[in-house]
Image (cartoon, rainbow, N blue to C red):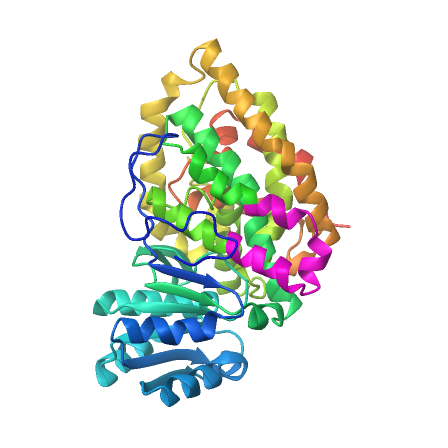
Amino acid sequence: MTVEGVSDPEGAGAATSPCPSCGLEHVVPVEHVVVGREARSELGRFLDERGLRRVLVVEDANTAEVLGDDLSADLAAAGHAVSTRRFAQRAGLLADEEAVGAVRDAIASRRPDVVLAVGSGVLTDVTRYATFLHAKPFVSVPTAPSMDGYASTVAAMQFDGVKITLPSHAPLAIFADTGVLAAAPREMILSGFGDLAGKASARFDWELAAGVAREPYCEAVAERVAVPLERCLEDTAGLLGGDEDRVASLTGGLVESGLAMAMVGNSRPASGCEHHASHFLDLLAFRGLRAHASHGLQVAYATRFALAIQRLALAHLGDPLLQPAGGGGGEDERRWFGEQYLALGPVHDEKQVWFAEHADAWPGTSGHLAEVHERLARSSARFERVGTALGAAGVPATTGFLGTDGAMLRATFRYANRIRSRFTVLDLLECQRHIEPVLDAVIPGDS
């Protein structure tokens, strides 16, 4: 790979030797990454070298204007047979069955050698999943540094109002023009920074799960995400102001995050309770209880509260597990989930199995507990800087942001652990019967 701001350019597409940190063999699934002004010219060269002559460009009305039209013209002038599938929406496009069907129809009728996803989160996931179903390669061409899924091997879809993650494939390559990215709207840059900032709480949850449930953990992979986060904390104002070097660093960090997920085979390096909270907010928007907001902004907002919850959890770390995680079933819980409640049954069942396997094993020996506490304390050392940066960026730790009120925000962190079967700090506190008093301390009342 040729990568600016992405740490390890070797070993793409193949397993490396066993990782000295965790002993596993990691696979970097993306063949080529370019983050820089030369991305567009490199893309054409990449397609030529691989004989990919028939190209389908997937875009929307916005991304066609900022990049897609010019890119299609460049490729056509170079002798490629270019067709497009342009979504008319300028806002509100969802990664749902209808959008996937539209791209699948275009693939079936135009029979491309490769599909280019020209856009950010939704367009990338729709293209990723549609090409996966057709066994077609795709190339990611980001138009904004707004999320970390460009290099992902899974697709975040919204079916029947519930965010689900489906097996898919990574792009063959990523070509990110920093001139285009730096010109993206401030809100989209903030969204990407919010997604990256959420890695601070995601790392805490990953390390917590490794300590409590002996879940596999890799320090080297975790650091691939932490290093670019630290870099972006150095000058958040410059980043949000569209400084091209800072935006390149953010984009590199978001790509790293996707690669980290692919390397361990799941979203642990990049997603914890803050992402589950964002998915819960998506569900509430689908039900008409609030307006839709971008994933990264929701993650940024949720991270403000996740970090506070995790700080308080450290004081309870050594307490035993007293009841199953995600026990649920109450009327308040059913009221917030609505008709989608029944769809969450498998998550509930998996958490009961988890509790049966681990309740008697925690907190374990005093030595093990001390080791877990030390690791989590180190992780939480960056929490204050992350919170300060988010606050300076305009993401508050109060109610009323992104269409929330106190009751909604409390429900988000009370029930977000029903969204995924993955263990987070919310499960630990619920198992210990500390979740209610912790939320009392963290979630502010409505002013």
- Left or right of 401 in this view: 335: left
Magenta span contains residue 230: yes
- The answer, for residue 95, to whether it is visible in the render is no
Closer to us: 328 or 298: 298
Residue 261 in picture, x, y percent from top left: 39, 47
What residue is at 45 percent from the left and 42 percent from the top? 269
What residue is at 54 percent from the left and 80 percent from the top? 66
Residue 208 in picture, x, y percent from top left: 47, 29
Vertical position of residue 241 compared to residue 269: above or below: below
In the orientation shown, which residue stands out farthest toward the right? 447
- The answer, for residue 115, to whether it is visible in the render is yes
- Left or right of 128 in this view: 136: left
Vertical position of residue 409 compared to residue 307: above or below: below
Which residue range is magenta in the image?
228-253
Residue 64 in picture, x, y percent from top left: 48, 82
Quarter holding residue 34: bottom left
What residue is at 41 percent from the left and 57 percent from the top? 163
